[in-house]
Image (tube, grey):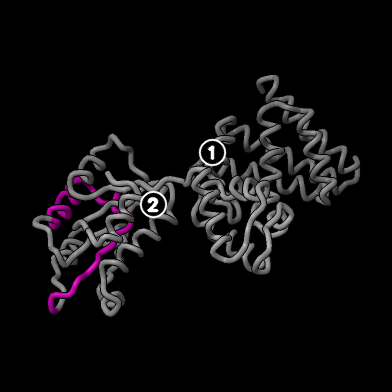
Amino acid sequence: MATPGKLLTEIKAGRFKPAYYFYGVEDYRITEAEKFLARQFLPDRQLQTNYRRISGKKTSAADLVAELATLPLLGERRVVAVSDFQSYKPHELKQILKMLSPPDPGRLVIFTSPSSKTPRKDSKFMALMAKATVTVEFKKLRGAETAAQISAKFKAEGLTIEADALVLLTELVSGNRGGLDTEVAKLVNYKTEGGSVTVEDVRSVSAGYEAYGIFELADGIIESRPRTVLKMIKTLLAAGHSPVLIATLLQQHFISLYLVKHEKKPLGNRTFLIPKFRRQAAGYDSQRLEQIIIEIARTDSEFRRGRLKPETALDMLAMNLAHEKQSGG
């Protein structure tokens, strides 16, 4: 097995292996690594014609074998990238992987699996892939790596970032390379060259800041900290968020917990927060999450009927949920 760092070093040195298998929780890094590998292996004039991308879900094993057996014209190089490779049956996998031997110096094959289909490391599939290819796992960036890349990207654009803003943005990005690139690009466009990115800039521009505040609120509920919950609600209200908006965001948050618990994507553009959603969802079973979503909808109805002040109804909802966890409900 190789690390992404070792893979990058080898590729930059012009040392290529006949076949690779990319997997892990970071779909964005997998996709970028595949494209980078193809660009480095193929001359510019061959990139358009000799870079074949194939879906393992939509392509039969026989058709893939035929594709791998095809020779490039005039001795040119070619790259074959096969997504969802885990879709094939065991006997099909063996048939396909036989095509890698003997290795063809003019052909490079990249097999990948999406994060939702990451195989177990002790599976027969992984043993087969480790024997036939160079396997590379793409994990989330660690906190220090995320912060370092954020700082480096701002520096390259003639910007700096304040320490507190760097901590907040690192937390929001949560190790997601795609989220990192997107949020840094937005802040670069927001600021002028030579400026410094502040906490207020991150709050104003970065996707998920409201979700971040709701995450803190949900943490207080899940960890049974009623006083903290009340304090967080007051902070959100003081920041200009209405009780209706807070209730809506809280409902969306618990819907996302339910979706992630069932291996689906959360609401909105928040895939970079999936690890946090999973951690919080672990505190509930599916039935309770469904009940909470309904309870929040009922509170929203109370807002609209005017039976209670919205602030009071929101406090009661959050406190009930927090006390319920405290009592083991």
- Image position of 159 with respect to 291: above or below: below
In the rendered structure, are the residues bearing label 2 and label 1 in contact, judged by CB atoms less than 8 Å apart? Answer: no
**Is there any visible trace of residue 117 in the rendered image?**
no
Q: Position of residue 105 (x, y in %)?
A: 14, 64
Name the residue tied to disc 1.
278
Residue 256 in which image quadrant: top right
Q: Position of residue 324 (x, y in %)?
A: 71, 25
Quick one: SS at disc 2?
loop
On whether residue 76 falls in the magenta region, the answer is yes
Name the residue tied to disc 2.
114
Name the kind of residue labelled 1 in the image: Arg
Quick one: SS at disc 1?
helix
Tell me the crowding category of disc 2: few under 14, some 14 to 19, or many 20 or more residues within 10 angstroms, Cα based: many
Tell me the crowding category of disc 1: few under 14, some 14 to 19, or many 20 or more residues within 10 angstroms, Cα based: some
The span picked out in magenta is 74-100
On whether residue 212 falls in the magenta region, the answer is no
